[in-house]
């Protein structure tokens, strides 16, 4: 299921038309797939030093992923519009 989630996220990134839609799939690829793969690893191997390393890696992905998506969206907005603040017509 984790590999299927990652493939779906990759497909979404490839198919979507603009950067903002692609970022939604990118965010899912750092949370859903790695968590499912980690769960499978824990079920198969139990808790040992390798699974603790995997837990740390997935934790970093889970925490840093949204921050990177947000920073990328702000950079894309700055390139597209010139400013990250909402324009008057976008406020409602």
Image: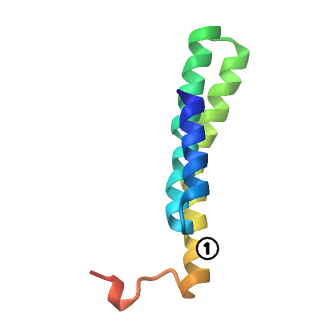
Kindly identify which residue carries mark 1: 75
Residue 13 picture location, percent across and down: 59, 55
Front residue of 48/3: it is 3
Residue 41 picture location, percent across and down: 62, 17
In this rendering, is residue 44 above or below 34? above
Front residue of 40/13: it is 13
Q: In terms of image quadrants, where is residue 35? A: top right
Q: Is residue 85 left or right of residue 48?
A: left
Kindly give the residue lying farthest to the left in the view shown. 92
Looking at the picture, the colour scheme in use is rainbow
In this rendering, is residue 4 above or below 49? below
Q: In terms of image quadrants, where is residue 8? A: top right
Residue at the (49%, 55%) spot, across then down = 24
In this rendering, is residue 27 above or below 75? above
In this rendering, is residue 38 above or below 43? below
Q: Is residue 85 left or right of residue 39?
A: left
Residue at the (54%, 86%) spot, across then down = 81
């Amino acid at each position: 299921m984790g590999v299927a989630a990652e493939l779906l996220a990759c497909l979404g990134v490839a198919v979507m038309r603009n950067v903002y839609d692609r970022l939604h799939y990118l965010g899912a690829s750092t949370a859903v797939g790695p968590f499912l793969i980690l769960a499978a690893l824990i079920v198969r191997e139990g808790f040992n030093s390798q699974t603790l390393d995997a837990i740390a890696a997935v934790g970093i992905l889970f925490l840093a992923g949204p921050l990177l998506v947000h920073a990328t969206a702000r950079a894309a907005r700055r390139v597209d519009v010139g400013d990250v603040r909402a324009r008057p017509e976008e406020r409602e």
